[in-house]
Image (cartoon, helix red, strand yellow):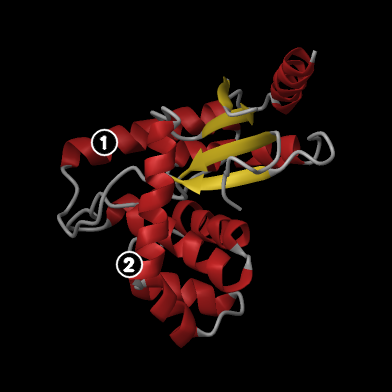
Amino acid sequence: MTIAEDGPESVLVYVHDPMCSWCYGFRPTWKALKSQLPEGLPVVSLLGGLADDSDTPMPLEMVDYLKRTWERIESTCKVTFNYSYWDQSPPPPRTTFISCRAVIAAERIAGRGEVFGERIQDAYYCEAKNVWDSEVLCDLAEQIGFNRSSYSEALLSDAVRSVHEEQRSLAERLKVDGYPSLLLIHKGEAFPISIRHGGAGVMLEDINDLLVDRQA
């Protein structure tokens, strides 16, 4: 679904990256929030992206920083990580755009972007798989029922790359500067919703309050 001028009066926009560790930590809260949203409120998922395509090994300083970040997320969000991912030598590259395109490809082929995004997260954070590798992504797609050849073609296509560029551009226009981000678009105006890990109820109140205030 896209955000259009002639679309619904209100839309909730979720901007994320499957290789964003804070997005993984937010996943339980996001699922809880979605289950409680007002009936009829559309949800649009935008794939942002932390790091462009690269095959350069990550600097050791970045590896150490991300390990510490995972530790913070574990204590804040009550999720767990498989730290064996960092045992690779040389370190993995700092690249996430391809995982975003992988979600877009799954959505375009079969409307299963969210399902595949979660599969990527599980493979990365729990199974220590290199989900920045197109062959690994095709393996994962095949495991959940995609035709490997068709999925690979979509993943590497200019069309999927173009959609990702459009989504990143829209996120930029919405002034998104971090992931995960949540915004309520109401009558063409964007209202950021504060991310509260473990606080689905409070976030729901924020959304409902905005809807009531703006309809009054």
Compute the Cα span from label 2 to label 1: 22 Å
Residue hosting label 1: 64
Residue at 57% x, 44% y is: 3
| Residue 130 visible in image | no
Looking at the rendered structure, the kind of residue marked 2 is: Asp
Q: Is disc 2 surrounded by few (<14), some (14 to 19) or many (20+) residues within 10 Å? A: some
Please provide percent x and percent y for residue 45.
Answer: 57, 47
Left or right, residue 141 beside residue 7: left
Query: Quarter of the image holding residue 146?
Result: bottom right
Closer to us: 161 or 102: 161
Task: Find numbered disc 2 in the image and state the secondary structure of the residue it sits on.
Answer: loop
**Residue 216: in sight, yes or no?**
yes
Disc on res. 133? 2
Amino acid at circle 1: Asp
**Image coordinates for residue 166, horizontal then vertical, percent:** 40, 50
Residue plotted at (40% across, 71% down): 155
